[in-house]
Amino acid sequence: MWIEELRLRDFRNYGEITLRPHRGMNLFFGQNGSGKTNLLEAAHYCALGKSHRTNADREVVRRGCPMGACSVRVAHADGSRSEVTLRLAPEEHNKKQVWIDRKRAARLADLMGHLGCVIFSPEDLSLVREGPAVRRRLMDMFISQLSPRYFIALQRYSQALESRNALLRDARREGALRGELMTPYEELMSQAAGIILPERARIMEQLSALAAEKYAAIAGREGEDFSLRYLPCMAVESFSPEKMAEKLAQRREEEVFRGSTGFGPHREDLEFTLRGREMKPFASQGQVRTAALAVRLAQLALFTRQRGESPVLLLDDVMSELDKTRRARLLEEISGVQTFVTCTDESDLDDFTDKRTWQVSLDGEACGCVRQTRAGAPEEAVPEDPEPDFS
């Protein structure tokens, strides 16, 4: 798949722009703070309904504006096309609205599958060093694109978890635990976990095998066996919603003091290992970079295998982080994949000749401007669609 058109209105530092990217490589260069990453963020929103940088939709709406929006027209390998629009209005009752082919979607889950993306950014170096939350996010954002039922299960689990935590805080404040109120939420959490755990185990097993191959190819050294090890909250093979609900009920008393739930899919982890050992205590910066890049390339390959078409690849200011060997391997892997790259220096991608380049800058009012400086190889003309209605 590839993005034929990207439109932003009052999104981050952009007023209103329309871009028609190249089907292959698209390079966005300019000074730091000019708004290059914001363009990738808009594409990410259209794929997953959320940012890769923040959980607060309010932050992406241009300052002083009541509403922001982003839209993509996507072409697929089977010849079909779809249009996705996200409308973000933090002060309204319906803060986030999704439109698919100009029709209002009933739920955010309907967004999944229209645009797939894999993003590689400097923050990926935290996948090894930081806590479990960043690795759970890695799992959730990728698996959601392959399995809408997983995304729905995550939403249901999170809602039930929030309600259970609220009851725990009430019990701590009032000194009385009302278990009968918790039971329905624990049952909902357990039913959702019955989808989350098997899907994580299945996808992470496949991703680990591919990531091991990618790591070996990039590192070029024998003996550095890399793998991903999924650490579930319960044994997946013997899991049942009834067992999990029972365990949650048993933990109520001890969790009242903390005011939060300490057990479940929201506490799981994904371990990065090298030569059978967890990487966090000993891995060098080079090994961490190789692991992060291997995982993203594995995501690219697994998505393509399962969906029959490649996702859009978003590379946010990472070329300068990679040495010559890793950069060459990356460029080799992404041949034929629509790619958006941001960097400060246009020469960072001199060794990739067929590309469309865009200069990103700020005008006198600190509003983002994007100017195409190189067209790339000519492509088949695409039909013009009317502007989406952002109102």
Image (cartoon, rainbow, N blue to C red):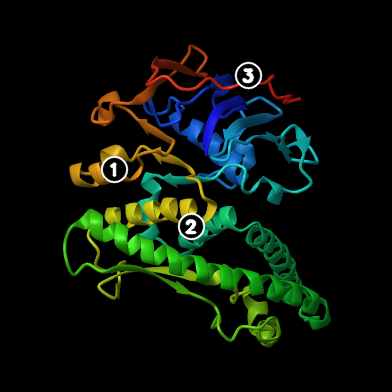
Point out residue 65 in the picture as x, y percentages from the top left corner.
67, 25
Point out residue 156 in the picture as x, y percentages from the top left corner.
72, 63
Q: Which residue is mark 1?
A: 332
Q: CA distance from mark 1 to mark 2?
A: 24 Å
Seen as rendered, the residue at the extreme right is: 180
Q: Which residue is mark 3?
A: 384
Seen as rendered, the residue at the extreme front is: 78
* Quadrant housing residue 238: bottom right
Secondary structure, mark 3, is loop
Q: Earlier in the sequence, mark 1 or mark 2?
A: 2
315 on left or right of 173: left
Q: CA distance from mark 3 to mark 2?
A: 36 Å
330 on left or right of 59: left
Please tell me how many numbered marks the rendered image carries: 3
Which of label 3 and label 2 is nearer to you?
3
15 on left or right of 387: left
* Quadrant housing residue 5: top right
Point out residue 282 in the picture as x, y percentages from the top left corner.
24, 67
Secondary structure, mark 2, is helix
Q: CA distance from mark 3 to mark 1?
A: 32 Å
* Kind of residue at disc 2: Leu
* Kind of residue at disc 1: Glu
Camera-side residue: 62 or 293?
A: 293
Q: Which residue is mark 2?
A: 138
Residue drawn 45% across and 45% down? 119
* Kind of residue at disc 3: Glu
Which of label 1 and label 2 is nearer to you?
1
Residue 259 visible in the snapshot: no
* Quadrant housing residue 151: bottom right
Seen as rendered, the residue at the extreme left is: 221
Q: Callout 2 environment at 10 Å: few (<14), some (14 to 19), or many (20+)?
A: some
Residue drawn 47% across and 55% down? 305
